[in-house]
Image (cartoon, helix red, strand yellow):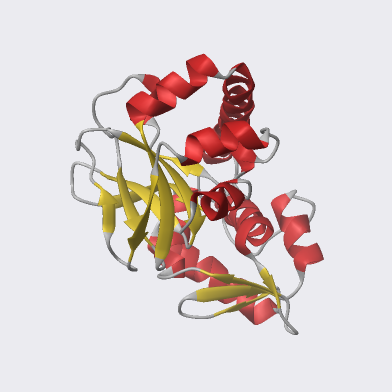
């Protein structure tokens, strides 16, 4: 890929969208493109955090393992998002593991070059501050959901958030492709797999969603919003 083509691809990344072309060109000259197949590990928790990563295509999940070996999804990365930035903030090691959910293309920038670019280009540093502020608001919202909301509301909010980020319009509704969808929803919402399966079956029965093995289609978005906003009673006991 030519540097001009790479610079054009970088403009699709949220962080780079408002940057002047010369700065984007300078950034593109410092990094490289990497390709990964579905299921491959981009990096492991504890690996040297020597690069900052920007997703161009595909999806990546950031995970950690609990002491009993259970996998917890910390974040789902979609095209245009930054991840694995520990080295850019001065950490020596990645705190979590990144796994490709699809065939993935990423732009990776050496952490040292990333820090240097921030110091040389104030407009890039400002864009990074705005990006981190967005990430912080998203993290705070998720913490509030996990701490205070009923499980049905957490699942509904998570599905709507995923629909807004990776959903595709179909004749049936908004389709969300997600491998091992029930397991991933359980990890994202802090609920058990049994509870998520039970809630999805009930919503499927009521026609709010069409639940498949590796996808969920929201067939009645308005009614799911009402569940997410706690505007209607559900038929389940709450689980905190």
Residue depicted at x 50% and y 20%: 118
Is residue 78 visible in this depiction of the protein?
no
32 shown above or below 201: above
Vertical placement of residue 228 versus 14, above or below: below
The answer to which quarter of the image holds residue 5 is bottom right
* Residue 37 horizontal side relative to residue 231, left or right: left
Q: Nearer the viewer, residue 13 or 190?
A: 13
Q: Is residue 126 above or below residue 164?
A: above
Q: Specify the quadrant that holds the N terminus.
A: bottom left
Residue 2 visible in the shown view: yes
Which residue is rendered at x = 57% and y = 73% of the image? Answer: 216
Q: Is residue 217 left or right of residue 50?
A: right
Q: Position of residue 161 (x, y in %)?
A: 64, 53
Q: Is residue 74 above or below residue 39?
A: above
The residue positioned 33% from the left and 36% from the top of the image is 51
Q: Residue 120 in the image: state x and y as whole percent.
A: 52, 16
Image position, residue 225 (x, y; %): 76, 57
x, y percent for residue 10: 56, 47
138 sits to left or right of 220? left
Q: Residue furthest bottom?
A: 171
Q: Nearer the viewer, residue 161 or 32?
A: 32
What is the count of numbered marks? 0
Residue closer to the observer: 88 or 165: 88
Q: Residue drawn at (56%, 50%), measured in percent from left and top?
A: 4
Q: Nearer the viewer, residue 28 or 172?
A: 28
């Amino acid at each position: 890929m030519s540097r001009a083509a790479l610079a054009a691809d970088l403009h699709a990344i949220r962080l780079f969208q408002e940057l002047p072309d010369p700065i984007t060109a300078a950034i593109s000259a410092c990094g490289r493109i990497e390709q990964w197949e579905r299921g491959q590990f981009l990096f492991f928790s504890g690996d040297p955090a020597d690069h900052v990563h920007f997703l161009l295509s595909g999806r990546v999940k950031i995970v950690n393992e609990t002491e009993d070996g259970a996998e917890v999804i910390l974040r789902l990365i979609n095209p245009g998002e930054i991840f694995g930035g520990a080295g850019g903030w001065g950490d020596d090691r990645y705190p979590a593991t990144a796994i490709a959910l699809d065939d993935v293309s990423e732009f990776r920038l050496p952490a040292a070059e990333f820090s240097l670019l921030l110091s040389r280009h104030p407009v890039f540093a400002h864009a990074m501050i705005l990006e981190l502020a967005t990430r912080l608001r998203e993290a705070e919202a998720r913490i509030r959901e996990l701490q205070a909301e009923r499980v049905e509301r957490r699942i509904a909010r998570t599905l709507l958030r995923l629909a807004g980020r990776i959903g595709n319009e179909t004749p049936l509704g908004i389709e969300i492709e997600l491998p091992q969808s029930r397991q991933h929803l359980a990890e994202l919402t802090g609920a058990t797999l049994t509870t998520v399966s039970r809630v999805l079956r009930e919503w499927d029965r009521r026609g709010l969603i069409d639940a498949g093995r590796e996808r969920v289609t929201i067939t009645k978005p308005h009614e799911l919003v009402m569940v997410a906003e706690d505007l209607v009673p559900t038929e389940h006991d709450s689980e905190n």
